[in-house]
Amino acid sequence: MKILVPVKRVPDPATTIRVLPDGSGIATDNIKWVINPFDEIAIEEALRIKEKQGSGEIVLCSIGQITWQEQLRTGLAMGADRAILVKSDQPLDTLAIARILVKVVNDEKPDLVILGKQAIDDDSNQVGQMMAEMLGWPQATFASQIEFADGKCKVTREVDGGLETIAFPLPAVVTTDLRLNEPRYASLPGIMKARKKELKEIAAESLGIDLAPRLRIKKLTAPPKREAGRKVESAAELVQLLHSDAKVI
Amino acid sequence: MGDVLVFAEYFGEHFPKTTLVAVNAGLELAKKRGGSCLAVVAGADVGALASELAKFGVSKVIALEHPALKDYLADAYAIAISALVKKLGSEYLLATATAVGKDLMPRLAARLDAPMASDIVAINDDNTLVRPMYAGNALATIEMEGLIKVVTVRATAFDAAQPSGSVAPVEKVPAELDDGALKMQFVAFNQTKSDRPQLTEARIVVSGGRGLRSGENFKTVLEPLVDELGAAMGASRAAVDAGFVPNDLQVGQTGKVVAPELYIAVGISGAIQHLAGMKDSKTIVAINKDPDAPIFSVADFGLVADLFKAVPETVEELKKLKHS
């Protein structure tokens, strides 16, 4: 099975994010950049599918600046076969990202696209679903289990109030939730091998797609800060204060 | 121009609070953009549900019906609802960012060639909207361009709509749908059995973290506190990751966002991604043995203590309070 895994570069989730005073963005000094954690789960799942089936190809794709090569190399070191970087320096909205990825899908013709349910920087949770619609493919978001049988894909999804199972034929788009798997670390031999793997660059502008953003961020502001309250000495004091002071019980 | 269509999600025969939140946000958006607010209930037979929703202040409710809409599936719903949006000429399509809202709205946005704003927390007068980014560490003021725009709203950021005293007309519309073109198939829904309130609807939420050390301790230590308070139970990502509890209990950036009157965090350190899901709660309590845990920086009341001692003591104190 050929699997395409779109990958986004994001600030390490443990990084403290600071909004710039002029509201134009976030401070990017001292930020460690990583693969979006949900995309890392997607790479891991692709590797497991390939290992289980004994054959296949895993292609990574990122859309961003030249520095994004670092995260693609990490994904290749985990075990993906090759990578595509669609280079773009301008801000792109989710529709434009989905359109570029659909173009890559039409060129590469994978059987399955797996990607994170959301990127932890813009928290949009849109691209997988948009791709599925543009391709006319089934979608399974928030996957916690993926199985293949009788030419069909069966996915267990994390939904409100429980787990839902849906089935559909391939090709399809699946987005990952937290409990799907625990991603592996890149091994030293993996890192060595990754250096020799193909990383193709394409200019976004060369694809003939309308990239003009239809959603624009006018400014960023820091949210109101919540102040720390008081420390209490005992459970008795806590219950008393919740009753008489906060009046919540 | 300015008309808003609210996608009204339901469970069984009732509308959860999250749907009434969408209606209220839809009413606010329509008012600020100078249009009307309509709602759509989709399913196989939804006349009764549509009549119920008609009491909440919208100007019309569409009962969009087709046998293929019986169970929610993204492909069928996207086809049926996009056709309705075009027929009505709505400028905005709006839903709450629930699991269904998050799954369906981006697919609809692509089908309608519309930009989409996820999880908005405020509607401004000047054609802009506000949404959190970076786990709530930044608030973005955004502007969208297009004849149709798609929006999901954060359930904790708007109040639920109230009955308006009048009843809007209900129109039954058969969905334009070709069964043969549908590829997705519903197999099963495995509901988490619980007598407790829903996380997103509860007045009080008690959440446990890695500090509880096991799923068994969630049952024996945390649950008595949850039930004494009549609360919903939540968990940190660390506790879900460790397999102590199911993922649908996860409170945080990538789980559920809650803002109850009282939030009690037990054995939770307070990672950025957890704070993103609960920091708008009215009163926050933290019980943790580490005095430097970041959770204390947002807590109104902090108890530095061993949770295995402090939680049972709190349950005892609550019982005493009840009987006093």
Image: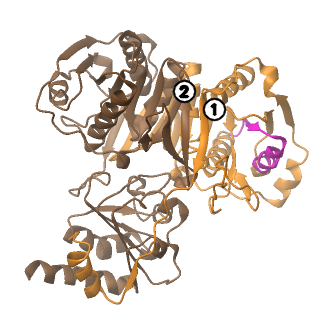
Q: Give residue A146's position: percent from left, percent from top.
A: 52, 41
- Can you identify the residue that label 1 sits on? A93
| Mark 1: few/some/many CA within 10 Å (<14, 14-19, 20+) | some
Query: Is A88 on the left or on the right of A24, as rendered?
Result: right
A188 in the magenta segment: no
Query: Is B6 on the left or on the right of B237, as rendered?
Result: left
Instruction: Check the rendered structure and report the hue given to chain B.
Output: brown
Whether residue A114 is visible here, answered yes or no, is yes
Q: Residue at x 42, y 17 (%)?
A: B82
Q: In terms of image quadrants, where is residue B177?
A: top left
Q: In the orientation shown, which residue stands out farthest toward the bottom?
A: A233
Q: Residue at x 49, y 84 (%)?
A: B291
Tell me the kind of residue under disc 2.
Answer: Pro
Query: Is A194 on the left or on the right of B43, as rendered?
Result: right
Where is the C terminus of chain A found, in terms of image quarters?
A: bottom left
| Mark 2: few/some/many CA within 10 Å (<14, 14-19, 20+) | many
- Can you identify the residue that label 2 sits on? B115
Say what secondary structure mark 2 lies in.
loop
